[in-house]
Amino acid sequence: MHSTRFTRPVILTRHAAQRMAERHISEAELLQVIDTGNTRFKDSTHLWAYKHLDGRTDNLICAVLVLETAVVVKTVMHEFIAED
C-alpha cells in the first residue's frame, strides 16, 4: 500500500493487521481512511485518521498512525468517537 496524502508507503503492524481482520476492514478501506479521512495530530509524527465509510454499521473507522519514512499503522479501531 502507498499513501498519496503522505507520499509514503503504508506499513501495518501485526496488531493493526489483526484488528483489521477482526473488524473486517479491508486494505482499500484503510487506505480511504488514511488518504481522505479527517486527521488529528498528537504531535508532529503521531496522529489519528478517521472517516465514516458508507455501507458499514460500525463507523467511525480510525487508524492510529506514526509518520516515519513510511506511514506506520499501529492499530485500527471501529466505533471511534472523535473528541473535540
Image (cartoon, rainbow, N blue to C red):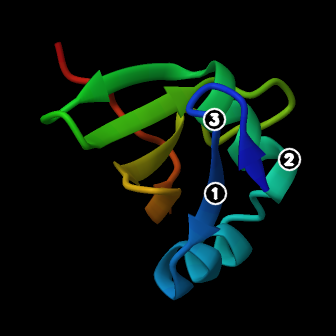
Residue 39 left/right relative to 25? left
Instruction: Quickly name the residue at label 3.
Output: 7
Q: Earlier in the sequence, mark 2 or mark 1?
A: 1
| Callout 2 secondary element | helix
Instruction: Quickly name the residue at label 1.
Output: 10
Residue 11, image x, y percentages: 60, 67
Q: Give residue 39's quadrant in the image.
A: top left
| Callout 1 secondary element | strand
Residue 4, image x, y percentages: 72, 30
Q: CA distance from mark 1 to mark 3?
A: 9 Å
Q: CA distance from mark 2 to mark 3?
A: 16 Å
* Image quadrant containing the C terminus: top left
Q: Are marks 2 and 3 in contact (CB under 8 Å)?
A: no
Q: Amino acid at mark 3?
A: Thr
Q: Nearer the viewer, mark 1 or mark 3?
A: 3
In the rendered image, the residue lying farthest to the front is 69
Instruction: Quickly name the residue at label 2.
Output: 28
**Residue nearest the observer in this picture, 79 or 50:** 50
